[in-house]
Amino acid sequence: MVRRLAAAGAVMALLAGCSALEGSGAARQPAPDGSDLSDRRFTSRPAATPTADPRLAEPAGPTAARRALRRALRDLYDARYGEFQTLVRLDDPRGRTIEYEHRGTYDLVALRAAYTSSFRIGGDGMELQVRSTDTDAWFAVTALTGNEQPDRTCWIHPDTDVVREVTGLDLPVAPGVGLPPQVAGLLTAEVTQLNGYGSLVGSTDLYTAAGLLGGGVQRALGIPFDSLARVPAEFYLTGDRITSWSVDYEDLVTAADEAGYLTRRMRRQARSAWPPGQSSHLLTELFRVGEPWTYRSPPRRRTIEMSAVDSFESAMRSCTGLGQSRA
């Protein structure tokens, strides 16, 4: 059940796929009514600094670590709401800045989320907006150009057959699409050590952790949806609250390789994908924990139904027509 909570980001990224980054031919359209994630602007912020726990003078073993994790997860559930951000900035060999950003809000009790994943190279790129519940999901893909505001098209609602084909999930029978990997990865955590400065050392499941950078990474590493493999992870605490957690891209590749998912070619491509000499640390931060927010499904008049036989390009063409007719 917990594994299904990580599906939303992977489902949407897989449905969009490389064809979205290569361009769908959709013309620029005004923002559809009600499509913005939030009026708030998320900005890059420094990594949260864990604070020392006065109860610990020395690192503690597995029993104390598991106890601390249970307290932290209980706090997360009690708080119910929160926001998250995973931000990665790299410089490619051509001197361009590559930026991956995943940000949004979640409701841990109702299994709902509204979040945005963006990918930029030198200022241009694509943005994927997602609305997800425990039984359904919608997404919108838009172009990003320089410092301009995103060009909105409309929302696409995939048929459950599409989701089943991509992930093996039968959503009406097995719900749980509601949480992105940034939150679901905490629910699959296991820990073995509690450090005195407020850090839990352990692991999370590999499939969910790879989803931090989108479904493309899960596919590139050959990780199946039902994988039981795990990857090292660290969870940072302030008191009993988890404020951030991290994995390393190199550890993702190593774990996938040790699980037998990588061919020789996949291994070579995965190792060379990350620019040399740059940190491969993936940090997810949680903030505004406990602050309520209102979930809104996309407006029906701005939504295109995507059937199992439709390609992503045809759905985007329909979406463009809708935008032109109702702009």
Image (cartoon, helix red, strand yellow):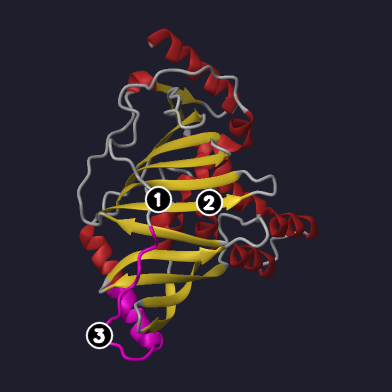
Do residues under tags 3 and 1 come within 8 Å of each other at their CB atoms? Answer: no
Q: Residues within 10 Å of mark 1 (few under 14, many from 20)?
A: few
Q: Amino acid at mark 2?
A: Arg
Residue 68, x across and y down, in percent: 31, 78
Horizontal arrangement in the rendering, residue 38 relative to residue 277 (left or right): left
Q: Amino acid at mark 3?
A: Pro
The answer to whether residue 164 of the structure is visible from this angle is no
Q: Which mark is residue 44?
A: 1
The answer to whether residue 267 of the structure is visible from this angle is yes
Do residues under tags 1 and 2 come within 8 Å of each other at their CB atoms? Answer: yes
Residue 281, x across and y down, in percent: 53, 63
Badge 2 is on which residue?
89
Q: Which mark is residue 54?
A: 3
Name the element at disc 2: strand
| Sequence-wise first label, 3 or 1 | 1
Please report the bounds of the magenta region as a residue range. 46-71
Is residue 69 on the magenta stretch? yes
Marks 3/1: CA distance? 30 Å
| Sequence-wise first label, 3 or 2 | 3
Residue 121, x across and y down, in percent: 59, 40
Q: Residues within 10 Å of mark 2 (few under 14, many from 20)?
A: some
Q: Identify whether 63 is placed above or below 72.
A: below
> Looking at the image, which residue is at 70% across and 65% down?
260
Q: Identify whether 159 is placed above or below 326.
A: below
